[in-house]
Each structure stands twice: as C-alpha cells, then as structure tokens.
Image: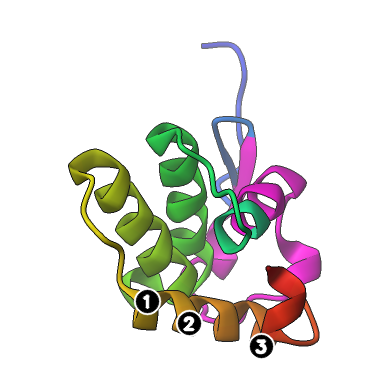
C-alpha cells in the first residue's frame, strides 16, 4: 500500500474519521460530513432511505463521533435498518428522541422543521 494515513485522521468509505474526537459525545452539525448529514436528514424526513447499507454507513459515523452505542442518531439508524430488514414497526419513542437530538446538535431549530 503506497498511500499512508495519519494516525489522527483515518478514512472509511471516503468519510473522514477524526480519531481524536471518537465517541466524544460532543457533535456539532457543522462537523458532520455532507454525505452523513444528508442521510441523517433523510432518516428524519417523510421518506427515509430504504437501502440498509447507506443507513448503516451513517450509523457507523454517529457511533464513532457521537456517544457510541448510546447516541440517539446511531440508535435510530440501527432501528430503521431493523425495520427494513424485518418489516416490523419501528419505535416511535426512539424516533422522537432522535429528532430531539438533531435539534440539540443543531440540525434544526425545532423537530417540526426536520419533517
């Protein structure tokens, strides 16, 4: 492999992972890469993505940069993938927590603006 990566900046699927800020719990909407921001907003919208691999990519980013397994965006993405895979109803309370979290990190001023 001729390409080297710094130990502080790793790339997964061309989405940068800042190792120094992993699982910091402090996410600012301005720090979210555009691809992850787009998928996250779609997960909050009326017509969320139906490709589980795309959703899992976003889940991975939120897990790494958010609160790990406790991150509401990660949890909702995993819940949505479960819904897609098993065709079971999704958890409405978990969705509300996800929307509240997106407001808290600056994706919108209020939950209604995300839908």
Q: Circle 3 sits on which residue?
A: 104
Label number found at residue 92 = 1
Query: In the figure, residue 14 lies in which quadrant?
Result: top right
On the image, the x and y values in percent for residue 64 come to 46, 60
Mark 3 or mark 1: which comes first in sequence?
A: 1
- Residue 69 forms part of the magenta stretch: no
Task: Tell me how far mark 3 sits from mark 2, CA to CA.
Answer: 12 Å
Q: Which mark is residue 96?
A: 2
Q: Residue at x 59, y 63 (%)?
A: 44
Q: Quadrant of the C terminus?
A: bottom right
Q: Is residue 87 visible?
A: yes
Q: Nearer the viewer, residue 17 or 1?
A: 17
Q: CA distance from mark 3 to mark 1?
A: 18 Å
Disc number lying in front (3 or 1): 1
Q: How many marks?
A: 3
Return the x and y of residue 8 as percentages of the image width and height: 60, 53
The residue depicted at 53 percent of the width and 65 percent of the height is 65
Q: Residue at x 75, y 64 (%)?
A: 31
Q: Is residue 22 above or below residue 109?
A: above
**Mark 2 secondary-structure assignment:** helix
Mark 3: few/some/many CA within 10 Å (<14, 14-19, 20+) = some
The residue shown at (72%, 75%) is 28
Q: Real-space Cα distance between discs 1 and 2?
A: 6 Å
- The answer to the question of whether label 1 and label 2 lie on touching residues, with beta carbons closer than 8 A, is yes
Mark 3 or 2: in front is 2
Magenta segment: 15-40
- Asked whether residue 71 appears in the rendered view, the answer is no
User: Does dot 3 land on a helix, a strand or a loop?
Assistant: helix
Q: For this view, does 15 lie left or right of residue 84?
A: right
- As rendered, which of 66 and 76 lies closer to the eye? 76
Q: Residues within 10 Å of mark 1 (few under 14, many from 20)?
A: few
């Amino acid at each position: 492999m001729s390409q080297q990566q710094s130990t502080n900046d790793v790339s997964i699927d061309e989405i940068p992972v800042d190792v120094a800020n992993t699982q910091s719990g402090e996410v600012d909407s301005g720090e979210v890469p555009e691809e992850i921001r787009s998928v996250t907003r779609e997960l909050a919208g009326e017509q969320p993505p139906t490709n589980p691999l795309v959703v899992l990519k976003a889940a991975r980013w939120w897990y790494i940069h958010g609160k790990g397994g406790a991150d509401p965006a990660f949890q909702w993405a995993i819940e949505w993938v479960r819904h897609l895979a098993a065709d079971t109803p999704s958890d409405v309370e978990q969705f509300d927590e996800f929307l509240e979290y997106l407001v808290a990190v600056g994706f919108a001023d209020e939950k209604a603006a995300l839908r």
